[in-house]
Amino acid sequence: MKQRSAMLAAVGALLAAAPARAQVKLDKVPCLGHPDCDRLSNGTVDLVAPNALGPRIIRYGFAGQDSVFGETAEVSATTELGEWKPVGGHRLWHAPEGMPRSYSPDNAPVERELSGSTLRLRQAVEPRVGIQKEIAVDLDPTGTHVTVRHSLTNRSLWPVELAPWAMTIMSGGGTVILPQEPYVDQPHQLLPARPLVLWSYTDLTDPRYAIGAKYIRVRVMADRGEPQKIGIGNRQGWAAYHRGRTLFLKRFPYDEAARYTDFGSNCETYVRSSFVELESLGPLKRLEPGASAEHVEQWYLFEGVDIGSTEAALEAALKPLLPQTMPR
């Protein structure tokens, strides 16, 4: 009996001494001039979503440090649908891009719902456009991993064809990193393998581009005001942004059997001066009234990353990190 009591006491002491299990906390904070925002935090990273507009995620970063997302408070576009403001951070659109449909304002309060570690943000139906947007964010209890589910629902009376389009405005001054399909020499591969999509204003002689055998890099330069955009058929399923010594990496699926907008592009980047967007797209889908399309991204952050100035240095930096982001 004494031995059993002693064992129970020892177990109780160990449990009391063990650190509490990490968990996701939700609180209210102001951010980017918006006083009423939800913050999800696990002690390592945090995310912030405003209640007054969206659905948006306007902050993602290591706790107590700067956000990796950018801010564009001074930018706006006025169309027959109203004034649209990019604001900054991460948002959801539907492709293909069109004026004024794509620029339907999302400046109104969102419906919010918290379930466990998942924060769900739902927009009212877009007037005249008839699409309802929703973003659900799930932060892991430990580490930097975030699951972001994007949903578009057709609330109109007729079928529509569209693709979910996840767009992240990054903080300027960094480098976009897009993976190329594996390099294979000509005698062993006769068919094309690397879709590269160019817009009418794309200029591949621009010094911001560095196109190598394994990666496409796009530097963000404040003194280069000409817009540039490229897209790729990204079967590797990831894209990244490096700034300072922090690497942001997003993963997303690629469906070989699906159709993608923009000549088969499922990953795009747009740069102009210090403004930069890192974008992924889901497949084109025909949505009957009431039907939805979903597109999922997985986010990761890494500290102390030096990508150097060559492809070899970049590959060496990414080699130990990419396996940590493989789908679970």
Image (tube, rainbow, N blue to C red):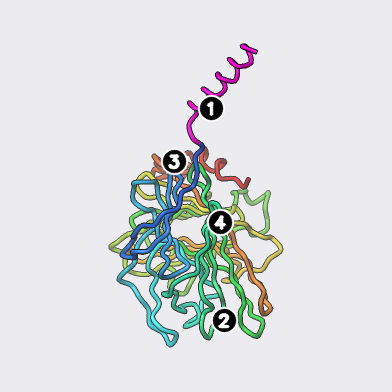
Q: Position of residue 16 (x, y in %)?
A: 50, 27
Q: Is residue 298 visible?
A: no
- Residue 130 circle label: 2
Q: Is residue 59 visible?
A: yes
Q: In front of the other: label 2 or label 3? A: 2
Q: In front of the other: label 4 or label 1? A: 1
- Residue 137 circle label: none
Write down the residue under mark 1.
Answer: 15
Q: Residue at x 41, y 62 (%)?
A: 89
The vertical placement of 70 against 182, above or below, is below
N-terminal of the two: label 2 or label 3? 2
N-terminal of the two: label 3 or label 1? 1
**Mark 4 and mark 1: span between their CA atoms?**
28 Å
Q: Position of residue 243 (x, y in %)?
A: 37, 50
Our reading of the magenta stretch's main secondary structure is helix
- Residue 115 circle label: 4
Report the front residue among 280 and 124.
124
Which element is circle 3 on?
helix
Q: Amino acid at mark 2?
A: Gly
N-terminal of the two: label 4 or label 3? 4
Neighbor class of circle 4 (other Cα within 10 Å; few <14, some 14-19, many 20+) is few
Write down the residue under mark 3.
Answer: 313
Q: In front of the other: label 2 or label 1? A: 1
**Mark 3 and mark 1: span between their CA atoms?**
45 Å
Q: Amino acid at mark 3?
A: Ala
155 drawn magenta: no
N-terminal of the two: label 2 or label 1? 1
Report the front residue among 282 and 197.
282
